[in-house]
Image: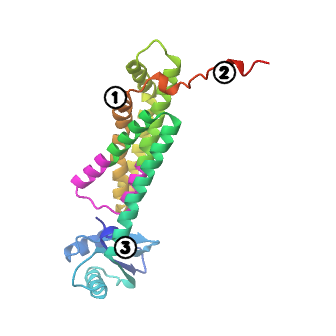
């Protein structure tokens, strides 16, 4: 967990010229602050350093040590702008709010898809979306990367992307249900997936190209954001095909679920 959730110290420093972030990171790493996060803040001359919570060390002492370590290695002295302490209680509140955001978005998806299609398709969409989130976070955990608010924002964006891809497949399945009456449910689903396959591949590749550019050129600040979405786009693409539709099929989805029932005596309503 990043200091957004665990608590820690924020140190803002300034330079007369553009700061060398790589040099600052190496300097802090050599000085024993390997968990420090360094990023530009506002302009290239302003730098924000995030340090995790350290027991028995005050924010003032910690900032003094950081400033001393930095000024030993750089020719231009850094000016201390501000020091802020983020308590663990704030981190707990952010973690709780983040979990509630995931929960509310999942409930909203369930209601929307159930209204748009049918409850069997809704459960398929939820299973696929939860699969994408859990597997993506599992990979992130296996790589031992820091989880902060930026990564949480990427997870919420992933939910929207995965749902959009699933809705496209479901739309084609509904069209097939209403068009082909002489095919089995499996054949109609396979046909729908094949029709949307080229669109899905092109969309995913386009998004992946953008995310790769962000990962390599966007700086260390958004590495977590771009990496989560890179994994998420891959998992979200195949889950819409291999998880969302099969789950709906296992629950017994059929053309009758999407065809509105004919009311008894409905043809009489339009008679004079």
Indicate the secondary structure of the residue bearing disc 1.
Answer: helix
Judging from the image, the colouring scheme is: rainbow
Mark 2 or mark 1: which is in front?
A: 2
Disc on the earlier residue, 1 or 3: 3
Specify start and end residues of the magenta stretch as a single range.
134-158
Disc on the earlier residue, 2 or 3: 3
Q: Which percent across, then down, holds residue 267?
A: 68, 18
**Looking at the rendering, which quadrant does residue 76 occupy?**
bottom left
CA–CA distance in space, label 1 to label 3: 44 Å
Q: Which percent across, then down, holds residue 161?
A: 44, 44
Image mark for residue 90: 3
Q: Which percent across, then down, holds residue 168?
A: 48, 34
- Residue in front for this viewpoint, 237 or 167: 167
Relative to residue 165, is residue 265 drawn left or right? right
Relative to residue 126, is residue 36 drawn left or right? left
Q: Which residue is mark 2?
A: 266
- Residue in front for this viewpoint, 61 or 80: 61
Q: Is residue 60 magenta?
A: no
CA–CA distance in space, label 2 to label 3: 60 Å
Q: Is residue 2 above or below residue 162?
A: below
Mark 2 crowdedness (10 Å alpha carbons): few <14, some 14-19, many ≥20 = few
Query: Outermost residue, right direction?
Result: 272
Mark 1 or mark 3: which is in front?
A: 1
Q: Residue at x 40, y 58 (%)?
A: 100
Mark 2 or mark 3: which is in front?
A: 2
Query: Is residue 20 in view?
Result: no
Image mark for residue 250: 1
Q: Is residue 149 above or below residue 254?
A: below
Quadrant for the C terminus, please: top right
């Amino acid at each position: 967990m990043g200091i957004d959730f665990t608590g820690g110290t924020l140190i803002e420093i300034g330079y007369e010229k553009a700061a060398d972030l790589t040099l600052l990171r190496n300097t802090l790493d050599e000085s024993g602050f390997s968990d420090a996060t360094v990023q530009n803040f506002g302009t290239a001359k302003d730098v924000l350093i995030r340090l995790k919570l350290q027991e028995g060390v005050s924010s003032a002492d910690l900032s003094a040590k950081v400033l001393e370590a930095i000024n030993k290695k750089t020719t231009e002295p850094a000016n201390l702008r501000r020091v802020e302490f983020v308590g663990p209680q704030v981190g707990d509140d952010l973690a709780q709010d983040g979990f509630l955001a995931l929960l509310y978005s999942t409930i909203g998806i369930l209601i929307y898809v159930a209204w748009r299609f049918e409850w069997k398709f809704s459960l398929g969409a939820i299973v696929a979306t939860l699969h994408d989130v859990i597997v993506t976070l599992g990979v992130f955990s296996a790589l031992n990367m820091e989880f902060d608010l930026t990564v949480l924002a990427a997870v919420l964006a992933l939910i929207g992307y995965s749902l959009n891809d699933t809705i496209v497949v479901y739309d084609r399945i509904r069209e097939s249900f209403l068009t082909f009456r002489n095919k089995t449910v499996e054949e109609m689903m396979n046909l729908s997936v094949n029709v949307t396959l080229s669109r899905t591949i092109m969309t995913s590749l386009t998004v992946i190209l953008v995310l790769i550019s962000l990962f390599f050129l966007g700086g260390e600040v958004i590495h977590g954001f771009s990496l989560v979405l890179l994994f998420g786009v891959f998992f979200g693409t195949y889950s819409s095909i291999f998880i969302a539709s099969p789950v709906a099929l296992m629950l017994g989805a059929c053309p009758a679920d999407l065809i509105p029932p004919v009311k008894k005596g409905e043809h009489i309503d339009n008679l004079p």
